[in-house]
Image (tube, rainbow, N blue to C red):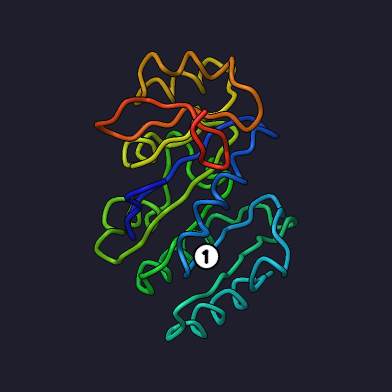
Amino acid sequence: MNGLSSTDIFLSLGRRGSGKSYLLRRISAAYPRKVIFDSLGEYTDTDGSLCYSFEEFTQAVLNTEHDSSFTIIFRFDPEKEDSRPEFNEALRILWYRGNCFVLIEEIQLFASTHAMPLWLKNALLTGRHRNLALGFSTQRPGECHKTIISQANHVFAGSLHEKNDLDYVRSVVGEGAYQCPLLQPRQFIYFRPGQEITKINNDLALI
């Protein structure tokens, strides 16, 4: 992909196994400073500094204050009933930290159609002033807050079949959303405001 900026917002949509997380990994490689919210436990300590608690996460962020490159992975406690307060506080820290790429896997776990944490909203609407780039993935876009797709500079829509999910995609990409049920694993339609829809695979190569 050409023309990426330090404040771009990426949204990767698709059913489980569609390749959306791998696509975001490829994008994140372009950013030397990154923080990953690992909602599904898909990352390991070989991918970066893995944090299992909010305290570990906070310390890891503080330790990178002068680093030109780092990868911090925050994995929420699966036994905690509601991780949203920690998620919100972590984003507050990152908003003030600035100058990094923040990747959030399965964003629908934290921002529903009717509610969005304050610091996620701040990151979406004012994060560019803090030099924040954002990446989101979701299996269920129809359950996500519409502010996310409305602010995205890059939308990648993979295989989707549920009407609510297709309606979510159609709200931005229009009739191109009807291609989604026909897509094979690793295939995506790519939309960028002001440009024509193209079809790519999750290596970011044109099909």
Q: Is residue 181 above or below residue 139?
A: above
Q: Which residue is mark 1?
A: 35
User: Where is residue 99 drawn, in percent x and y?
Assistant: 36, 70
Q: Amino acid at mark 1?
A: Val
* Residue under the point 34% across and 26% down: 172
User: Where is residue 132 drawn, in percent x and y?
Assistant: 36, 62
* Residue under the point 69% across and 50% down: 40
Give left or right: position of 164 versus 3.
right
Number of marks: 1
For this rendering, which residue is in front, 110 or 29? 29
For this rendering, which residue is in front, 117 or 70? 70
User: Where is residue 25 drawn, in percent x and y?
Assistant: 57, 52
* Residue under the point 43% across and 71% down: 93
> Image quadrant of residue 75?
bottom right
User: Where is residue 54 drawn, in percent x and y?
Assistant: 59, 71
Q: Residues within 10 Å of mark 1 (few under 14, many from 20)?
A: many
